Amino acid sequence: MTSHGIPRVGGPKDISGPARDKERRKIQEYKSLVDQLYEQIQNQQYTQKSLELTTKLLEKNPEYYSIWNIRRRILLYLFARDRDTISEGQDATSDKSRVDFISGLMSSDLALFIPLLRKFPKCYWIWGYRLWLLNKSKELLPPAEAYTFWQRELGLVGKMLTLDSRNFHGWGYRRKIVVALESFSPGDVPCNGSMVEEEFAYTTRMIESNLSNFSAWHRRSKLIPQLLDKRQATGNERRNFLDQELDLIQRALWADPDSKDQSLWFYHQYLVSSFDPRKSPYAITLDLAPNERETYLKRQVDDLQEMLDGAENSKWIYQRLLELSLIYHVSSGRWLVAEDQIQSWVSNLNTLDPMRRGRWTDIAIEFRG
């Protein structure tokens, strides 16, 4: 079985004889490790040995979230113990020693679980633990030192997304890393504040390598308002930008107009929402005149009707034609196409997507009204 085209390892196996005995020994060893760790924690033995026990357990089962929480408790104790030990007679040397100690613990911990992350890239607890460690670096380390950790993590998540470009855990994690990097003060670290230009370019590269990347298209749509604001784009610059994005998505749709890939159509829907006067506060272009809006809508409808040739079984084309026609009516008070054309699109949708027949019927009534 695969996920996003990546083979999924593991799964239930029919075992018997020696293999079953071996499995039983593994279970007994695992339970013994759990018992040892809980005994130490009950006795408040937050030591390097207890930390090593959590490592062994998590390498066997990273979904055991309680062990991640225990590991956090141990590290917090070690961080605090070192701080209290050094605080007596505090000077520049001892402060550097404290920083080096905490930095060393964090660095080794982040490196330790990289193989585990590669083996279990969809495990929430690994991603969450790494984020916790990074947030602690901002609390406990000088800004420049903490910034280095976050930068390295951005490189790591980039490599993870190269292995599986549609891993939504990785995309969500990347967003959080970028927000954290942007929050550092330029006076403390060598940064330029906003990373929106770099991130927008990153989505372009990821889309070019794989058009069917929902997370990349979604991320792109969220970056566009920030990008245009940062550029202080004028009305004409916004129009040019919209034209470029429409051209990009049109080329992607033309590559396989009969595709059932929803990500392309969702991004197309985001772009054409700029022509809907009801959604003007969220539009890419903020000052479209009515005649400009109608010209854009006509062009989109013409392109989609042309795309239908050879892709008559694509429900997404019919659905978008109906949506654009409704927007045109809201904008101009006129219908863009004849009623029999609209009823033909509705009829095709009823055939291609009968589960939503009620929705298509409601749309047909709205057109007649």
Image (cartoon, rainbow, N blue to C red):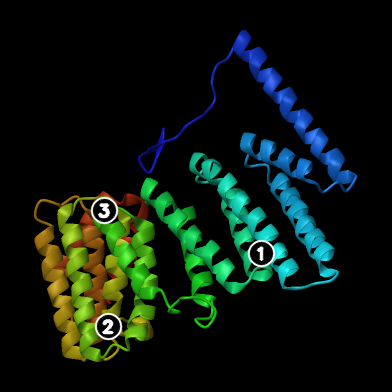
Quadrant into which the N terminus falls: top left
Q: Which residue is the site of mark 3?
A: 209
* Residue 154 visible in the displayed image: yes
1 vs 3, front mark:
1
Amino acid residing under circle 1: Lys
Can residue 124 be seen here? The reply is no
What amino acid is at disc 3?
Answer: Ser
- Who comes first in sequence, dot 2 or dot 3? 3
- Tell me the amino acid under the disc marked 2: Val
- Please tell me which residue is depicted at 41% across the width and 51% down the height of the picture: 159
Tell me the residue that label 2 is attached to: 330
Residue 204 sits above or below residue 275 on the image:
above
Q: Nearer the viewer, residue 131 or 338?
A: 131
Numbered label attached to residue 136? 1
Task: Report the Cα–Cα distance between label 2 and label 1.
Answer: 52 Å
Q: Is residue 97 left or right of residue 109?
A: right
